[in-house]
Image (spheres, grey):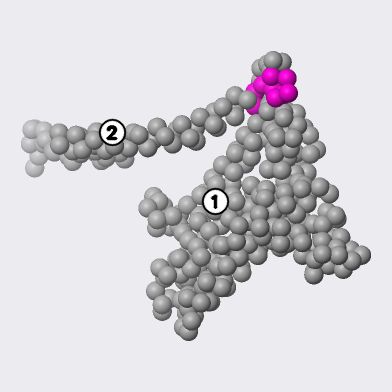
Amino acid sequence: MTTGTDVVTTAEPEVTGRRRRPRLSEGARAERRLGWLLCAPAVIVMLAVAAFPILYAVWLSLQRYDLRFPQLAHFVGLSNYGAVLSSPYWWHALIVTLIITVVSVAIEFVLGMLLALLMYRTIFARGTVRTIILIPYGIVTVAAAYGWQYAWTPHIGYLVGPNSAPLTSQGSAIAIIILAEIWKTTPFMALLLMAGLSLVPEDVLQRFYRVTLPLMKPAILVALLFRTLDAFRIFDNIYILTGGGNGTYSVSILGYDNLFRALNLGIGSAISILIFISVAIIAFIFIRLFGAAVPGSATGGR
């Protein structure tokens, strides 16, 4: 039997997707203000050291600015970027840079993983083995590059005959540059990967492909990201080995030639900004691909 009275029900308030942040106490707010004040000097220094040069480079890239004729400098907008992106030299340098980056980083990852396993599992003379493996990375890049140059120079080097000059041919010169990069920086890759191996339980290491590699994704991300960004900005090895000649110039060599040899600050700055954008895109792609593996990420459980 029903009555004429309305039944009043109390419903739980709807849970919205956004949670309210708990209100901070006065002491917590004071601590937060103090934290910002303590961080402010470091932030200001970082902005002065990093942000200002980037912004100034952007401003220079928008001008027609030849350092030999500074009085003729004037604003041209995006014309410098159009000139760079329509130039075959830029695209050739980008292709060479990508070839060096992809090939060297891929080989370094495989060799670095093998060396990381060797360093991690070595029982006897572990310190000696790790020191020997890390020696190439401890050598100054310029000194190492000169060593590789002498090794492949006719009548001087021990890796080439008197009648051959591999550094004067584009294909063989790029191969030598890649080989020098691999020799120099594979220990760095191995060091980063070994740090990831140390976080994996010993019994899990027995199941390498299905368990160990997924657990090492954060370390793999750091290793691949650091080396890819470093390889994309390759300069010193190419500068010493070939000087960018015979079609071996990278985007960094191209920027250097325009900035310091041609003294064209506008075009050189535009190339520098394009390199910066390329590096940012590479970093974004890596973060998107491996983001779920990064500790503390919102999708870390996927």
Vertical order, 112 against 23 (above or below): below
What residue did someone put label 1 on?
A: 286
Q: Magenta stretch: residue 288 in it?
A: no
Q: Residue at x 69, y 15 (%)?
A: 71
Q: How many marks?
A: 2
Q: Amino acid at mark 1?
A: Phe
Vertical order, 78 against 25 (above or below): above
To which quarter of the image does residue 168 belong?
bottom right
Q: Residue at x 58, y 55 (%)?
A: 227
Which residue sits furthest bottom? 124
Q: Magenta stretch: residue 63 in it?
A: yes
To which quarter of the image does residue 43 belong?
top left
Assign a secondary structure to mark 2: helix
Q: Position of residue 118 (x, y in %)?
A: 53, 76
In this orientation, does residue 286 appear?
yes
Q: CA distance from mark 2 to mark 1?
A: 34 Å
Residue 37: numbered disc: 2
In the displayed structure image, the side of residue 53 where residue 42 appears, left or right: left
Which residue sits furthest front? 156
Q: Position of residue 179 (x, y in %)?
A: 71, 63
Q: Position of residue 263 (x, y in %)?
A: 72, 30
Q: Classify the position of the N terminus by image quarter.
A: top left
Assign a secondary structure to mark 1: helix
Q: Position of residue 127 (x, y in %)?
A: 47, 76
Vertical order, 75 against 238 (above or below): above
Q: Which residues are magenta?
A: 61-70
Numbered disc in front, either 2 or 1: 2
Q: What secondary structure characterizes most of the magenta part?
A: loop
Q: Residue at x 63, y 52 (%)?
A: 231
